[in-house]
Image (spheres, helix red, strand yellow):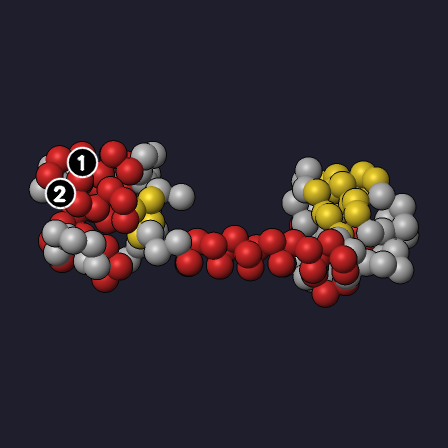
């Protein structure tokens, strides 16, 4: 083999090696670019899925509805549907607003509402009559001179004959434990109060 032929063979081999190297470089670049594109597409699809899920959750988080019965001095009494965070003034608006004879100050218009609630709006006359009846009842209770053993303080109980601080405390402890006295005779169930003491105080006590 002459020198010229050897040179041609060597040049051919080198050319083939260069072509192979160039091809591998392109594949590597193509692979890297493909991997980056897939990663970006994955991030975008993940963000889209999160946004769709977030929007879906917002759509399902609507306020729960409640029903309130508005009656009394309003234009259109009835049962009305409102959102669970509604206030009294919104229910009254649904019922057409106050009637002319309504006593608006009787109600806290900012009051939160509950499902199944009745919202009764009194007239001024009804309000005054109710207040007068309450004042009369309180006056009668105060004027009878009897000690209510279900509500009396320790000092009030000590005004009873034969009842000192320790017995007054026992009376209070008993009513707190048992939910109060049903009759005045129940006071004999309290430790330290026998028939003799009861006979002294029975005309000076009450349970209502």
* Disc nearest the viewer among 1 and 2: 2
Q: Which residue does the numbered mark 1 point to in the structure image?
A: 188
Residue in the picture at 55% in, 59% down: 135
Of residues 191 and 60, the one nearer the viewer is: 191
Label 2, secondary structure: give it.
helix
Label 1, secondary structure: give it.
helix
Residue in the picture at 32% in, 40% down: 180
Q: Is residue 151 visible?
A: yes
Residue in the picture at 83% in, 40% down: 78
Image mark count: 2
Quarter in which the N terminus is drawn: top right
Quarter in which the C terminus is drawn: top left
Mark earlier in primary sequence (1, 2): 1
Q: Residues within 10 Å of mark 1 (few under 14, many from 20)?
A: some
Of residues 97 and 42, the one nearer the viewer is: 97
Q: Position of residue 44 (x, y in %)?
A: 74, 50
Q: Position of residue 95 (x, y in %)?
A: 86, 49
Q: Position of residue 74 (x, y in %)?
A: 85, 51
What mark, if any, has residue 134 been given in the picture?
none
Of residues 129 and 116, the one nearer the viewer is: 129
Q: Is residue 144 above or below residue 69?
A: below
What mark, if any, has residue 197 been given in the picture?
2
Q: Is residue 25 visible?
A: no
Image check: 192 left or right of 19? left
Q: Position of residue 129 (x, y in %)?
A: 68, 55
Distance between the alpha carbons at the discs numbered 1 and 2? 9 Å
Residue in the picture at 60% in, 54% down: 133
């Amino acid at each position: 083999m002459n020198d010229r032929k050897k040179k041609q063979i060597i040049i051919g081999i080198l050319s083939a090696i260069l072509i192979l190297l160039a091809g591998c470089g392109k594949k590597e670049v193509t692979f890297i670019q493909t991997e980056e594109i897939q990663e970006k597409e994955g991030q975008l699809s993940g963000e889209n899925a999160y946004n769709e899920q977030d929007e879906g959750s917002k759509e399902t988080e609507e306020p729960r509805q409640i029903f309130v019965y508005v009656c009394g001095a309003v234009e259109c009494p009835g049962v009305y549907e409102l959102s669970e965070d509604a206030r009294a003034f919104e229910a009254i608006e649904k019922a057409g607003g106050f009637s002319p004879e309504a006593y608006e100050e009787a109600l806290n218009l900012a009051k939160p509402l509950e499902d199944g609630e009745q919202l009764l709006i009194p007239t001024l006359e009804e309000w005054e009559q109710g207040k007068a009846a309450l004042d009369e009842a309180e006056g009668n209770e105060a004027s009878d001179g009897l000690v209510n053993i279900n509500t009396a303080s320790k000092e009030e109980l000590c005004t009873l004959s034969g009842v000192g601080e320790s017995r007054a405390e026992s009376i209070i402890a008993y009513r707190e434990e048992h939910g109060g006295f049903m009759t005045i005779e129940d006071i004999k169930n309290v430790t330290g109060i026998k028939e003799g003491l009861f006979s002294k105080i029975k005309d000076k006590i009450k349970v209502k």
